[in-house]
Structures are given as structure tokens and as C-alpha cells.
Image (cartoon, grey):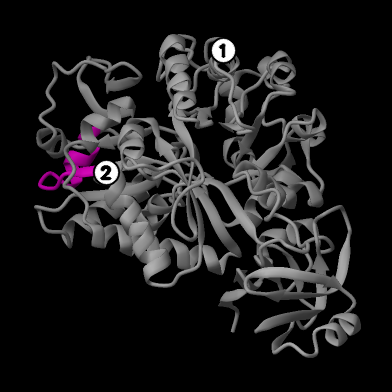
């Protein structure tokens, strides 16, 4: 049985402004687009149902090109600190949670961000000890490149004052050289290794929460990196397969594979783009540096607000190059986390020394801090940049002081990248940012941030058009996953994935973009979410 979709604004996204009157789909594919009358006449002998869009706006299904799906589900299950606007508010929430939590359970909070507080001082071990001395407490910073724990957690992890910072990480200390409970980047593994093992049931619960939420926000799928954090690759993959396929939740998950589990992945006989229905394997994930919040993003110059450091290289240039070489040996592209300009340079050096093969594109994830010469060097390479437009609204204005005004010209330079012919895909990096794609689209179009009660537009020359911004999450995500021939536009032969809004994102006031109402989310012709 087919479906006739009509009576709405149907944007194909093939080119700016192109609309069709109706779409006929069958067996999960777009069969034809065109005139409602013509399609009705042509397919009248077929059994089909009709979906009256009631004036709503249909676009190709939105896909988040970079996030952590299980991590997002965990955020929905755990104590969410991301919107708390003071340190005291966070501490009060931890104290309240401790009063109702068994002492043999860890208290885990997600998403604290000292840049929302005044003064912007991080939480330290002694403050947590004062409010929860009998519980192990772990609080993850919003960037997930830093965390803070209390003394009970340090005891569980068998960490004492003699501990040294590992390569690619930082163990925080106070002015008296005592552990302050802060761990950054690879040092976080010292704490993670002490956490109780997660169960398959827990992973499935987190995935169900995350997928239901994604559907309600218009997402038909995501590119996600979860495979090395939850008890091994196979257990994590089994949870995905159980929730999505065996329990019948159509959701297209493109799975990046962290280099630390790549041998397990290879031994299991997987290959690029293989997998189950709705599940496919993507590139090999590598972290080249950290994040700006904890000053661990790797810069080519000292931090403006802390000249003692220029960030952290998770891998040396030689190690990074060898990891890329390893990916090539198993016919994989790489997906490299690069926030700082020096990390971007290291990654360019590595992929140029060991070029990708078989028309497989590498992915540079984030690409926030750049220089003109890096953009020139990247042009023409078989690569895309996974950008997170919401980082503009999260990082400005404090990032200017962190990087230095004189170093800001080519940072968060989305318009420049597109103008130079570099393909970009749009994601959220959830749970670091909100998963709602409308927030990313709004940030890309407006670049507005509320500062002291007034809206300020940062780097207005880098604003995208609405077509460009929406394309990040449609065509851009399709290209990033090597699906540009069957996803990302509404066209004959393409998969019938649609995001349908009550309002028209191309015509509403720009400030109303974040409040658009999702009317339907459609995956392979199946309506997985419908607004009552």
C-alpha cells in the first residue's frame, strides 16, 4: 500500500525554494513527486492511503550528524545540570539527590557549565564532600571533556595524591598542589574505570528515551558515537539492535567506531556501511584534542586568558598519523574530533600522508577554531566538516576572551566554509548541546546571543541562509554518511523520510524558528510521531 502526501508546503531541498504539490510513496521510497491531480490519476489503481498535511510544511527528514545517542538518553534519565545558572543551584541539587539515594549508588550529574555562573568558578572536590560525604559523586561538564568528583569517588577509583596526569589528560590540583577532584580528557578514564558496569537493560532504557525524544523533535536518525563506553562494542550494538529493530522503532543510526574498539569491530567481521536494518557502521572515531571550556582544545598559540597552556594533544602527530594509517588498512575513513586549529593541522597532516580511498570521505568533527591557511589546505580534500551551530550561542561571548580577539577571524566560520566549497553537516553533539535541530538551524541563521539582557549578533558575516542551515541537517548529513544518492532530498527513488512542521521554517520570523511545532516525523513512509 502506498501513501499520497498533499495539501502542504512540500520543499524538496534539491534547490532553494523548490516545492511540489504532492508526493507518492510506497515501500518506504519516494515513487514520484508532482501535481496532486496527476498523481491521483496515475496511481488510482493502487491501494494507497492519503495523508492530508493540512497546510503544514514537509521537508526531507532531519538527521543529526554528530551526537551521542546513549549519552543523550542518560541525560534524560540522570540529574540534568545543564540549565542551572549558579554553582549553589548545582550543589543544592546534589544535596537533595543524596538524601534520596542509597549510599552504595553513585550520584551522577550531567551538563554543568561554569560559564553560566557568576563568578564562573568550577565545582571542586571539597564542595562536594561537604554536601555528600557518604556518596560517590561524579558530575560531567557540559563538554564531556571534564568532570569533577568527590573524595568518596576518588577512593572507589583508588586514586591518591601521588597520581600523575596521563598522556592526553589533566588531573586537576589546587593552589597547594592537592587534588581538587577535576579530571580532564584522558584523565577522566581514571574515574570511568571505577564506575559500576552498565547493564544491557540500562542501555536499552536510555536508547528508548533518546529515540522517543528525537522523533518528537523531528529527527529521523542520527550519526552517533557510543560504541566504546558501555561495556564493549557488542553489548552496545546489541542494545541498539534490540531497541531499533527487534522492538520496532524505525530510527536510522549511523554508528561511528572509536579506535579503541576497532580491533573488536574488525574481528567481528564488520565493514564500512555494513550492519542491520536501520543500523550501519561508519568511520573510525579519533579524538585529536579536548574542548574550549576546560582549555584542552589544542591551539597553535597560548590561551588568551591562560598563557600557561595551549591545550592538550590527545595523540602526538606520529600517533595520530598511525591511527589514520590503521583505519586505511581496514578500508575506513576517519572521523576526528578537532576543535583547536593545531589539532586541525595535525589531522590534515595525517590524512594527507595516508589519503582515504574508494571515494570514502573523512569527517573533521567540530572545526571551530581555524585559520585561513587551514581552510585553503582543506579545500578539495575528500572530507566534510561536522559543525555544531549551537556552539555559537553557547560559546559567545566568553570564547573571545579565551581565544583572543586577534585570533577570531576564521572561528565558527560556517559561511566561509560553505563559500569555499567545503561540505558541512549539522549536528548537536548532544548531550553537550540540546538535541533539538531547530536550535542549531536558528543559531546558524541568526548567530544571536543574549548578553546582559540584549541580543548581540556575533560575526554576522558568517550567518547562513535558511536553505543553507536546513541543508546541514538534510543533504549535509546524507553526504556525511555516504547516502547522498538516496537520502537528504525529496526525489524519486529516495527514502521516504520526512520532517513535517505545522509552520513554515522558510517564512516564519527568524526568532520563531526554535518554537516551530513538529506535526509529524516519518521514517521510510511510517509515521513514527504525530502531534495530537
Residue plotted at (12% across, 44% down): 133
Query: In screen coordinates, is 161 left or right of 319?
Result: left
Does 217 appear above or below 165?
A: below
Q: Which residue is mark 2?
A: 232
Q: Is residue 193 above or below residue 475?
A: above
**Whether residue 308 can be seen here:** yes
Q: Secondary structure at mark 1?
A: helix
Q: Residue at x 76, y 62 (%)?
A: 490
Which quarter of the image is occupied by the C terminus?
bottom right
Which numbered marker is on residue 2? none
Q: Position of residue 75 (x, y in %)?
A: 38, 54
Look at mark 1 in the image and give the residue it sits on.
353
- Residue 355: x %, y % from top left: 59, 20
Q: Is residue 186 left or right of residue 72?
A: left
Quarter the N terminus occupies: bottom right
Range drawn in magenta: 125-138
- Residue at 31% across / 42% down in the picture? 229
| Magenta highlight on residue 127 | yes
- For marks 1 and 2 on the same chain, the one whose residue lies earlier in the sequence: 2
Between 176 and 153, the residue placed more toward the observer is: 153
Mark 2 surroundings within 10 Å by alpha-carbon count, few (fewer than 14), some (14 through 19), many (20 or more): some
> Does the magenta portion include 530?
no
User: With 246 as the anchor, is 354 left or right in this view?
Assistant: right
325 vs 29: above or below:
above
Q: Nearer the viewer, mark 1 or mark 2?
A: 1
Amino acid at each position: 500500500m502506498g501513501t499520497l502526501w498533499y495539501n502542504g508546503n512540500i520543499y524538496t531541498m534539491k534547490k532553494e525554494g523548490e516545492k511540489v504539490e504532492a508526493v507518492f510513496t510506497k515501500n518506504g521510497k519516494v515513487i514520484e513527486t508532482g501535481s496532486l491531480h496527476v498523481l491521483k490519476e496515475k496511481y488510482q489503481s493502487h491501494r494507497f492511503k492519503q495523508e492530508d498535511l493540512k497546510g503544514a510544511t514537509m521537508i526531507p527528514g532531519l538527521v543529526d550528524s554528530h551526537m551521542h545517542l546513549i549519552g543523550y538518553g542518560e541525560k534524560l534519565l540522570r540529574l540534568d545540570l545543564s540549565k542551572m545558572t549558579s554553582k549553589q543551584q548545582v550543589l543544592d541539587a546534589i544535596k537533595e539527590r543524596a538524601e534520596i539515594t542509597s549510599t552504595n549508588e553513585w550520584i551522577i550529574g550531567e551538563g554543568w557549565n561554569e560559564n553560566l555562573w557568576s563568578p564562573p568558578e568550577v565545582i571542586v572536590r571539597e564542595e562536594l564532600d561537604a554536601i555528600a560525604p557518604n556518596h560517590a559523586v561524579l558530575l560531567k561538564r557540559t563538554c564531556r571533556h571534564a568532570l569533577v568528583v568527590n573524595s568518596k569517588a576518588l577512593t572507589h577509583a583508588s586514586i591518591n595524591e601521588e597520581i600523575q596526569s596521563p598522556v592526553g589528560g589533566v588531573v586537576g590540583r589546587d593552589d597547594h598542589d592537592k587534588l581538587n577532584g577535576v579530571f580532564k580528557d584522558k584523565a577522566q578514564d581514571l574515574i570511568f574505570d571505577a564506575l559500576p558496569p552498565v547493564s544491557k537493560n540500562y542501555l536499552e532504557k536510555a536508547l528508548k528515551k533518546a529515540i522517543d525524544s528525537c522523533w518528537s523533535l523531528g529527527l529521523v536518525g542520527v550519526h552517533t558515537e557510543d560504541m566504546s563506553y558501555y561495556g564493549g562494542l557488542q553489548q552496545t550494538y546489541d542494545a541498539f539492535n534490540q531497541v531499533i529493530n527487534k522492538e520496532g522503532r524505525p530510527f536510522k543510526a549511523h554508528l561511528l567506531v572509536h579506535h579503541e574498539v576497532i580491533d573488536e569491530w574488525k574481528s567481528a567481521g564488520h565493514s564500512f556501511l555494513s550492519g542491520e536494518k536501520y543500523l550501519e557502521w561508519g568511520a573510525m572515531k579519533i579524538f585529536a584534542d579536548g574542548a574550549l571550556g576546560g582549555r584542552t582544545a589544542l591551539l597553535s598559540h597560548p590561551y588568551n586568558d591562560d598563557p600557561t597552556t595551549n591545550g592538550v594533544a590527545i595523540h602526538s602527530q606520529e600517533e595520530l598519523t598511525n591511527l589514520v594509517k590503521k583505519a586505511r588498512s581496514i578500508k575506513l575513513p576517519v572521523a576526528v574530533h578537532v576543535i583547536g586549529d593545531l589539532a586541525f593541522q595535525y589531522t590534515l597532516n595525517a590524512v594527507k600522508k595516508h589519503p582515504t580511498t574508494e571515494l570514502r570521505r573523512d569527517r573533521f568533527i567540530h572545526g571551530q577554531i581555524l585559520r585561513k591557511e587551514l581552510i585553503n589546505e582543506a579545500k578539495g580534500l575528500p572530507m566534510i566538516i561536522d559543525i555544531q551551530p549551537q556552539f555559537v550561542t553557547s560559546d559567545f561571548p566568553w570564547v573571545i576572551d579565551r581565544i583572543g580577539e586577534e585570533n577570531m577571524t576564521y572561528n565558527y566560520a560556517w559561511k566561509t566554509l560553505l563559500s569555499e566549497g567545503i561540505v558541512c553537516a549539522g549536528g548537536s553533539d548532544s548531550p553537550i548541546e540540546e538535541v533539538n535541530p531547530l536550535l542549531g538551524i536558528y543559531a546558524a541563521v541568526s548567530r544571536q546571543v543574549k548578553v546582559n539582557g540584549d541580543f548581540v549578533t556575533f560575526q554576522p558575516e558568517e550567518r547562513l541562509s535558511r536553505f543553507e542551515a536546513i541543508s546541514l541537517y538534510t543533504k549535509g548529513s546524507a553526504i556525511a554518511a555516504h547516502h547522498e544518492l538516496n537520502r537528504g532530498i525529496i526525489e524519486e527513488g529516495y527514502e521516504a523520510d520526512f520532517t513535517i512542521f505545522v509552520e513554515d521554517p522558510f517564512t516564519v520570523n527568524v526568532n520563531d524558528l526554535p518554537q516551530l511545532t513538529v506535526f509529524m516525523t516519518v521514517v521510510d513512509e511510517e509515521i513514527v510521531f504525530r502531534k495530537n
